[in-house]
Amino acid sequence: MLLALDAMGGDRAPQEPCRGAVRACESLPDLEVALVGDGKRLEPLLAEVSSNVRSRLHVVHTEEYITMEDSPSVSMRRKRNSSLRLALDMVRGKEAAGCVSAGNTGAIVAGGVLVLGRIAGIDRPGLGVPILSLSRTSLLIDVGATVRCKPVNLVQFALMGSIYMRCLAGVPEPSVALLSNGEEDIKGDDVISEAREILKASSLNFVGYVEGKDVPVGKTDVVVCDGYTGNVLLKFGEGLGEGVFGLMKEEIRRSFLPKIGLAFMWPMLRQLHTRFDYEKQGGTPLLGVEGTVIKAHGRSKARAIDNALRVARQFVLQRGVETIREEVAKGGM
């Protein structure tokens, strides 16, 4: 399987994308990666790679790439030779089975729509992120693809999230909830209220509203919100986790007794950190477009890129795009 990797996307490109591609190919003998980017910068990073792995790493040269500051839709149209655009073109042309990028989220979403197109019946795509909680893994959708939503967008996110959890994650009858500022029906703005009424009349297992405090405890299988709210919630969770561990380290450094307790708690703390480590998750699929597109975290290091490639490979093997297309065509509402 050949996957296209935007080697110039992300805060640590191209070094970490290259290292991540090497790691993935070392452990997955069926995987090939097209590293799309500046060949003059990529080739030296692959010089020490074993011949077996190097033969499955293909450099697709371009000196143009999209930065984090570029306007998403404008750059996607004007920078037709950018590393991201060429990677998406490879997916559209069936040269690659999927595309992975840690670059500009807006450009990835715009590219997914402009280059690959939307699945019939889906108005706007959504990024769905699995959230590990106390009782289950919940899918939070959207986390940045569609910032301003209409009720129909939230309803379609709920449908795609339910399909993802049922068909790809193996949850028999996934529960679906809207993220709101309270559990009562009177809460929420006009957009959320209208989406609620549509979902109540649908065939989905809609359970109403959940609040932000319900997401970490896994109150439902699918949590639906607009991309702005979802992105803020996701980044707050990441920051909170880093802040808590930072405070613990500071207290341990300042006092002797916590150092003794740490000796007993360290295995548990490491396990807890692993459960909520974004690098372990790797990347999240852009649901609703006609091709496998995986968005990795902008700060991704080699381990995260490696896992993002694994997510892409698994999504292709599970027929993720085809499954969503077929289920939407059935009228899953």
Image (cartoon, rainbow, N blue to C red):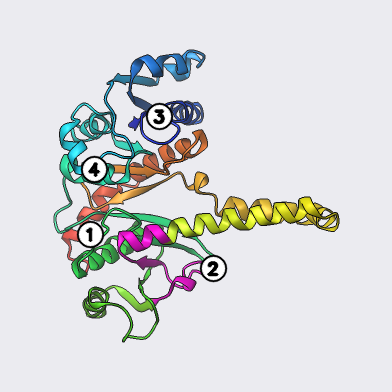
Alpha carbon separation for disc pair 2 and 1: 27 Å
Q: For residue 313, which quarter of the picture?
A: top left
Q: Secondary structure at mark 3?
A: loop
The answer to which of 91 and 88 lies nearer the viewer is 88
Look at the image and tell me in which quarter the N terminus lies.
Answer: top left
Q: Is residue 33 at all visible to an observer of this figure?
A: yes
Q: Residue at x 46, y 39 (%)?
A: 300
- Judging by the rendered image, the residue that carries numbered circle 4 is 72
Q: Which residues are magenta?
A: 210-232
The amino acid type, in three-letter code, at marker 3 is Leu
Eye-nearest disc, 2 or 4 = 4
Disc nearer the start of the sequence (2/4):
4
Eye-nearest disc, 2 or 3 = 2
- Judging by the rendered image, the residue that carries numbered circle 2 is 135
Residue 274 is situated, as x and y percent measured from the top left of the image, at 59, 50
Disc nearer the start of the sequence (2/1):
2
254 in relation to 89, above or below: below
66 in relation to 233, above or below: above
Q: Residue at x 40, y 21 (%)?
A: 56
- Check residue 327 in the rendering and tell me which mark sits there, or answer none: 1
Asked if disc 2 and disc 4 are in contact, CB closer than 8 Å, the reply is no
Eye-nearest disc, 3 or 4 = 4
- Judging by the rendered image, the residue that carries numbered circle 3 is 31
Alpha carbon separation for disc pair 2 and 4: 37 Å
- Any magenta on residue 166? no
